[in-house]
Image (cartoon, grey):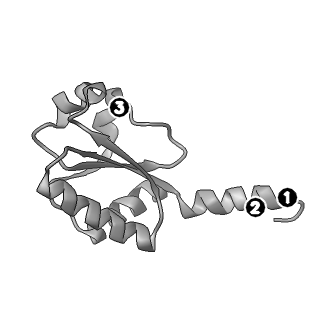
Amino acid sequence: MRGASLSQVAGLIGRLLHACRITLFSRDDCGLCAQAKDVLSNVWDKRPFHYTEVNLAKTEFKHWRSLYDFDIPVIHISKAEIGEEDIGKVGKAVKLMHRFTAEQVEAKMNQVEDA
């Protein structure tokens, strides 16, 4: 990148390395959620991403609890530059539910990055 500063190049590299944001909707004492975290950890080791966890047991997330309480774990995968999750746009979210593999997560990440 001719004429770019070192900080601009570093910022671009950071965005490329973390091209996706993954939000995990979970709850305490959830065995499937623990498995989902292990899968996401394995994916992150190969392909870093921005990560947010939404614990449905917390009162500030009651709007998400009413949507996903019986479906957890759920992950939303989006482009990193898109802001935090918006319950009004949940129908458009790229997501996986319950049991999923690292390969399935990476396939969804590819789908998001190619969109």
Q: Is residue 115 visible?
A: no
Q: Nearer the viewer, mark 2 or mark 3?
A: 2
What is the secondary structure assignment of the residue under circle 2? helix
* Mark 2 neighbour density, 10 Å: few (under 14) some (14–19) many (20 or more): few
Q: Position of residue 67 (x, y in %)?
A: 19, 32
Q: Residues within 10 Å of mark 1 (few under 14, many from 20)?
A: few
Residue type, mark 1 in image? Ser
Q: Amino acid at mark 3?
A: Lys
Q: Residue 45 versus residue 21: which sits nearer the camera?
A: 45
Q: Are marks 2 and 1 in contact (CB under 8 Å)?
A: yes
Q: Could you tell me which secondary element the residue under label 3 belongs to?
A: helix
- Residue 57: assigned label: none
Helix or strand or loop: what does disc 1 sit on?
A: loop
Q: Residue 34 sits in which quadrant?
A: bottom left
Q: In terms of sequence position, does the residue under pointer 1 or pointer 3 come before the other?
A: 1
Residue position for label 2: 9
Residue at (12% x, 57% y) in the render: 31
Q: Which one is in front in this view, the residue at disc 1 or the one at disc 3?
A: 1
Q: Residue at x 19, y 63 (%)?
A: 35
Q: Residue at x 14, y 37 (%)?
A: 69
Q: Quadrant of the N terminus?
A: bottom right
Q: x and y percent of residue 90 in the render? A: 30, 35
Q: Which residue is mark 1?
A: 5
Residue type highlighted by circle 2: Val
Q: Are marks 1 and 3 in contact (CB under 8 Å)?
A: no
Q: Would you say residue 54 is visible in this rendering?
A: yes
Residue receiving disc 3: 89
Q: Earlier in the sequence, mark 2 or mark 3?
A: 2
> Cβ–Cβ below 8 Å for labels 2 and 3?
no
Residue 81 location in percent, x, y?
Answer: 55, 45
In the rendered image, the vertical position of residue 46 relative to residue 5, given as above or below: below
